[in-house]
Image (cartoon, rainbow, N blue to C red):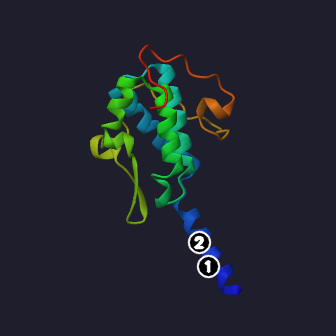
Amino acid sequence: MKKIFTLALMMTIAITVNAMSYSDASREALFLSDKMAHELSLSDVQYEAVYGINLDYLLHVNGAADAYGPWWNNRNAELRHVLTVRQYDKYIGMNYFHRPLTWRDGAWNFAVYARYSDRNHFFKPRQRPVARHHGGSTWRNTGHAAPPPAPRGHRHGR
């Protein structure tokens, strides 16, 4: 019994160590969303939604197995509702946006930094990160208004 307890405690510590702090997740979501806004030509409303989606994803990634697990799938499903078909297809083709996170050598690695190495350069006026996150993914679970209707030709849910 003592061995099981020790093993469970060690696993909990390992998972906790890999989790991102709120301030780290917020900073990374802001940087990633800014670059997505620039390359995908997002509107201000889309940018705000994308930031929330990216923040939710990063807050729920607790270890290497989570990087492309359920929260990554949720992120893609949410982005399908926010982006136009053209924007989403472009997003899928940009690995540094589509697969933004890896766990390597004991640390999170963000693919977007291979393309944008200056961590202080922002294309959009820098928004203040949300001071308090209420949990849940973007508009569906937070009580915020739904994003505006998608432009013509937008496909929901592939």
**In the image, what residue occupies the spot 49% across and 26% down?**
156
**In the image, what residue occupies the spot 46% across and 43% down?**
28
Where residue 72 appears, x then y in whole percent? 48, 46
Q: Could you say which disc has been placed on residue 7 in the image?
A: 1
- In-image side of 146 versus 58 (left or right): right
User: As displayed, is residue 139 above or below residue 72?
Assistant: above
Quarter of the figure with the N terminus: bottom right
Q: Amino acid at mark 2?
A: Met
Question: Is label 2 in contact with label 1 (beta carbons under 8 Å)?
Answer: yes
Kindly identify which residue carries mark 2: 11
Which is nearer the eye, 76 or 115?
76
Which is nearer the eye, 47 or 125?
47
**Residue 77 visible to an observer of this rendering:** yes
**In the image, what residue occupies the spot 54% across and 31% down?**
128
Q: Quadrant of residue 125?
A: top left
User: As displayed, is residue 78 above or below residue 4?
Assistant: above
Q: Amino acid at mark 1?
A: Leu
User: As displayed, is residue 144 above or below residue 94?
Assistant: above
Where residue 60 appears, x then y in whole percent? 57, 50
Element under label 1? helix
Where residue 113 appears, x then y in whole percent? 33, 45
Element under label 2? helix
Where residue 38 appears, x then y in whole percent? 35, 27
- In-image side of 110 versus 50 (left or right): left
**Residue 26 visible to an observer of this rendering:** no
